Image: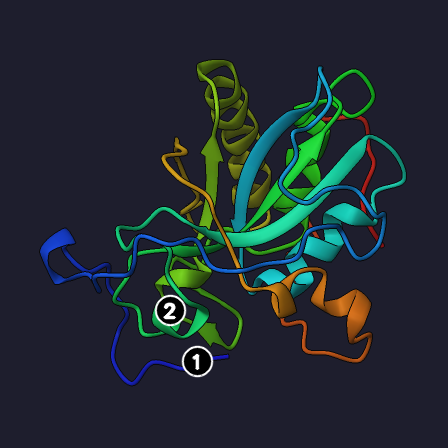
Amino acid sequence: MLLFRKRPEMPAPSEALPGRPEALPTAERHFVNGQPLKGPYPEGIETVVLGLGCFWGAERKFWQLPQGIHVTAVGYAGGYTPNPTYEEVCTGRTGHNEVVLVAFDPAVLPLEAVLKTFFESHDPTQGYRQGNDVGTQYRSGIYTTSEAQAQTARAVRDTYARALDAKGYGPVTTEIVPLETFFFAEEYHQQYLAKNPGGYCGLGGTGVSCPVGVGVAAE
């Protein structure tokens, strides 16, 4: 992944790359479970978009959950450039985050449990980085699709912040904002670690348990 030579910072909207009006070509179906990647998703399925570092390993954390996941997909959110490419996102000039769209059944897997996996799978105190991956596209973020999701996300974040503080970690930097647009990433990024089992994954959690949800977590 890209290492910046200077301290990363978000670009102003006027500085962002122009992008393009056309959506990038991507996969039609999930490589692991065969579900249509873009939906339409069945009635009752909820979506949330999460940024927790390089999206290759991040996506795997969620498709490996034992129950309640309908489909996952990787893409870009939280920035300015329409329909950005991976290379454009890695310049730091789109404002986007590398993210995972998680479509889940809240009757089986509550949002609190999804967020438990989210928080325990990365270090949400690192700002614009995860480990050796440095840049605005590696920031911790929850991009919500309803006010109810936002309230739950803030509650879980605050609960985990207290647990991290008790273990000597600094402030949680996770941004929680309404999702504006999710741009699907290119086909080769979708379910990358299922296609390339020995591929790069730079994710690492803190080892601090998030004391909410139902205790499900990916291996």
- Residue 2 is tagged as 1
Going by the image, does 48 lie left or right of 195?
A: left
Colour scheme employed for the rendering of this structure: rainbow
The Cα atoms of the two marked residues, 1 and 2, are separated by 8 Å
User: Which residue is outermost to the right?
Assistant: 66
Going by the image, does 41 lie left or right of 99?
A: right
Q: Is residue 87 placed above or below 71 in the rendered structure?
A: below
Residue 1 percent across, percent down from the top left? 51, 79
Q: Residue at x 34, y 80 (%)?
A: 4
Residue 45 percent across, percent down from the top left? 70, 22
Amino acid type at mark 2: Gly
- Residue 211 is tagged as none
Q: Residue at x 51, y 77 (%)?
A: 132
- Residue 135 is tagged as 2
Q: Residue at x 48, y 38 (%)?
A: 142
How packed is label 1: few (under 14 Cα within 10 Å), some, or many (20 or more)? few
